[in-house]
Structure formats: structure tokens, C-alpha cells
Amino acid sequence: MINSGNRSCKICDRPGTLQEASEVVEVNCNVRRFAHQRFTVWRCNNCRSLSSRDNVDLTSYYQQYPMQQQNSDLPWRLITGNYIRRLQKVGLQRNHSLLDFGCGSGLLVDELHHRGYRRAVGYDAYNKNFASRDVLKKQYDFVVLQDVIEHCEDPVSILDEIIDLTAPGGMVCIGSPNAEAIDLNLPQSFVHSLHQPYHRHILSATILRHLAQSRGLLEEHFSDIYYADSFRPFANVRFCHHYATFFDNTMDLAFEKYQLHWKLLKPRALALAFLGRFRPNRVEMMFMFRKP
């Protein structure tokens, strides 16, 4: 059931409102089961973050959620390997403890274990295998919040929670779409980043940096290239988004067997397949903050 909600920004100090918002758009869900449903997204005039107007019962939407169907096959292991290399660049070592908060299917935790990072654990309230809150009773050297904060009704509280879960000197790693890079004049071009109704509040890079710094975190790394982007042919974000338009343009396609289509032979598809990584869409942001 949908009811009106999220009519004022929950993120910034001078919250804008839906009533005064200069950017408001309606967009469909990008999950196949709910693709017929449409939702309203609006931008705060102050912090430039995006909010989903409609409150929903997310429990029903997360049933059979495509992301929970991830398998540890070679493509996903390669993508996860890209993520682990980013963590290594800011100091992740095998003796470190790590919490993947909102771990989904647990693919990152599994791959970390496979590579010898035995102190990695996961938590996800929507996955019964990782739903135990016992792991939230201690602090960790690394706390990862990848594609999670935008799913939360109160992202500021989640930020405070993961800071508390981080040991002094530890790293807080946050990955999320950047609201400032999403053009609401082209909602279908950004349907996967908007990801309605799952993305409740999409923060701007400016406000996320401000929130972190105001809590004493020290920024050590920032990237606006998605960790899943790759120079391997047919394995970059721009091509994958183009490929999805050949079919129903839902995120389900990313977790299904690759399908052939005659449009793959068209010049634009081939150009994106081999060269798309050289023109990343820069919608995804990743911050690495150190807790003093």
C-alpha cells in the first residue's frame, strides 16, 4: 500500500520540501515484478538530494529481490574483485575485521573469505542468512556500506550507526548513486539509479561529504566511477544499460543468462561494448573515510 510521505528532506539542515521543489518527476520501477508501478521523485532545493515521495511496505518489494539472486559465478567474482582492490588501496589487510552492512546475498563476504580475509562478516535485515544483529555488537576495522544508504528511510541515522560500528582509525566505505549526477529531465535514462521505490533518499556528493566531515571523518579517497565498470569487452556500465533497452530494461537482466539480440551487431552497441568504459557515466560515487 502506498501513502503520502517524504514531503520534506530528511538529510540537510535547511530541509527543502516537495511543495517548493523545482524538480519533480514520475518514474517506473526497474524491477520486473513491479515495472507497471510508477513513483514520484523530487529534489531538495537546498542539498540537491533526491527523495522518493511515496512510502511503501518494502518488505513485500524485497521478496524475490533480484540482487538476492546473485551467484558467485566468474563475472560477479571479477566485479567483486574490483571492489576488494579498492579496499586494499586504502589499507585493507587480511588480519583486519570487516563488516559488510547491507550485504545482500553475501557475495562480497564470500569472496573476501575465498581470498583469505577470514574476519569479514555481513549483515542484511532482508536476508535470513545475514539477519542476525549479533554482528552489530562490536566494532570493525572496515565498515562497508555499498548501495545501502539510499535504501534507508533515515540515511543520517544509518551513517551515525556505521560510524559507531567503526573502530578508531578504521575505514568507513560508502558507495551510492550521486544525486547531483542524475538528470530528472531524463528519468528513463537514470531509471536504474533512481531504482524506485527501493531508493528512498539518494544523497548528493556534496551533502554526504558534509555529513561525514561534520562527524569528524577524514576523507581519504573519492571515485565517481562504479566499481563494476570494466575495460573488458561487453562488461562496462554504459554497454550494460544499453543492452537492457533491447529487452524490458529491468535490473533482473543483470542476474539472468546473457541473451543474444540482433541489435548487438549495430555500430553503437559494438562501440559501447568495446569503448564504453572510456566514457563512464559517473553517476555512482564511492567515499572512503577514516575515523580518527
Image (cartoon, helix red, strand yellow):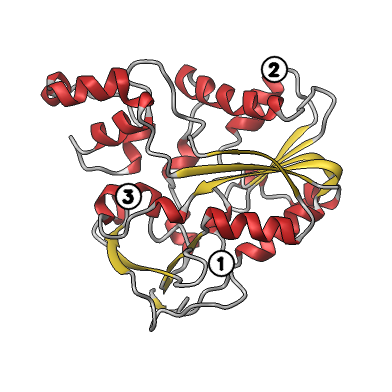
Q: Is label 1 in a helix, a strand or a loop?
A: loop
Measured from the top left, where is residue 272 in percent x and y?
26, 25
Q: Nearer the viewer, residue 148 or 168?
A: 168
Q: Earlier in the sequence, mark 1 or mark 2?
A: 2
Is the Cβ of the residue at disc 1 closer than 8 Å to that at disc 2? no
The image quadrant that residue 40 belongs to is: bottom left
Question: Which residue lies at the image location 31% right of the left edge and 20% below the top edge?
Answer: 275
Give the residue at mark 2.
Answer: 115
Circle 3 residue: 190
Label disc, if present, on residue 288 of the rendered structure: none
Task: Identify the residue shown where x is 38% and y is 74%.
Answer: 2
Amino acid type at image mark 1: Glu
Residue 228, how many percent across, how many down? 47, 30
Check disc 1 and report the residue beneath it: 153
Where, by quadrant of the figure, is residue 278 drawn?
top left
Q: Is residue 106 left or right of residue 150?
A: right
Mark 1 nearby-residue class (10 Å; few <14, some 14–19, many ≥20): some
